[in-house]
Amino acid sequence: MTNKKRGIPERWEKYLPMGRPIDGTRFLPFKAPLKPELCKSQPESEWFTPNTLLENTPMLRAVIDLTNTNRYYNSEEFTNKGVLYKKINIFGGGRVPPRKVRDEFFEAVDQLRRTLDHDSDALIGVHCTHGLNRTGYLICKYMVLRMKIDPQEAIKKFQEARGYPIERENYVSDIMSEIPNRIAFGPETSIYHTYVSVNMDSTVDIQDGQFTNINNKIHVGTAL
């Protein structure tokens, strides 16, 4: 049996490397790209490395990494080629990501949308291990709460783009529980963004995030 701690993640090979951009958004979901030494147990035609991703996605301008490890690849493979990189450590295993994680993701995407506003074709890549559950959950929550898209429509758009359904029923239920405030605020506004949840939690104000320094794990590389 392959030692997954040293090779590819469990079930990684079962999923296509990436989907297509989600209609009406900048999001591109994909599974975790792996450094070549991790891919070597697979036929070379099935390798999916940072370089493979960049070669096949010339409009990729940013990557948000939701895995809870740094072993899959070196982030400098992106930043050295001018691609912005954000690390948000999220445990897998099926637990719904906590609100503070969701807020961090929202702030990161808000900032990226402002930064990339001049480039209409720029894509924001998002991945977890399989590019499906954590990735789908956070992208769909953003689409509902920031972009004011109906929860069912957000899930449909994600699943059509990625090519697989979100597997975690509790993730889907949590997305479906949201009622977006229909006053549409864009990330460029200076006011706070609000949302209402059917679980009767209090309204939460979320300020735009800032990509500032290496301590926040945001790196801007010099384009080659």
Image (spheres, helix red, strand yellow):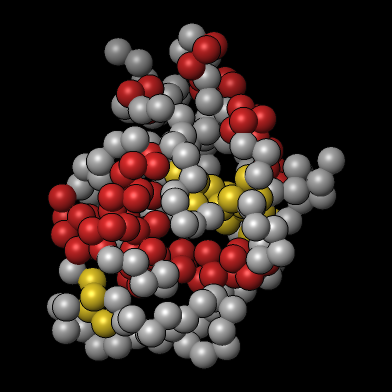
Q: Is residue 140 left or right of residue 104?
A: left
Q: Is residue 198 shown to the viewer in this render?
A: yes
Q: Is residue 168 above or below residue 96?
A: above
Identity of the residue drawn at 49% across and 45% down: 21
Q: Is residue 85 left or right of residue 104?
A: right
Identity of the residue drawn at 33% across and 42% down: 160
Q: Nearer the viewer, residue 163 or 7?
A: 163
- Image quadrant occupied by the N terminus: top left
Which residue is at the far top? Answer: 43
Identity of the residue drawn at 42% across and 70% down: 147
Q: Nearer the viewer, residue 6 or 105?
A: 105
Identity of the residue drawn at 21% across and 83% down: 201
Across and down, in percent, residue 88 comes to 48, 57
Across and down, in percent, residue 128 comes to 42, 44
Across and down, in percent, residue 204 comes to 34, 85
Q: Is residue 21 above or below residue 19?
A: below
The part of the image, by quadrant, that contains residue 184 is bottom left
Q: Is residue 81 left or right of residue 21?
A: right
The part of the image, by quadrant, that contains residue 142 is bottom left
- Image quadrant occupied by the C terminus: top right
Across and down, in percent, residue 137 comes to 32, 55
Count of numbered circles on the image: 0
Q: Is residue 148 above or below residue 63?
A: below
Q: Is residue 93 shown to the viewer in this render?
A: no
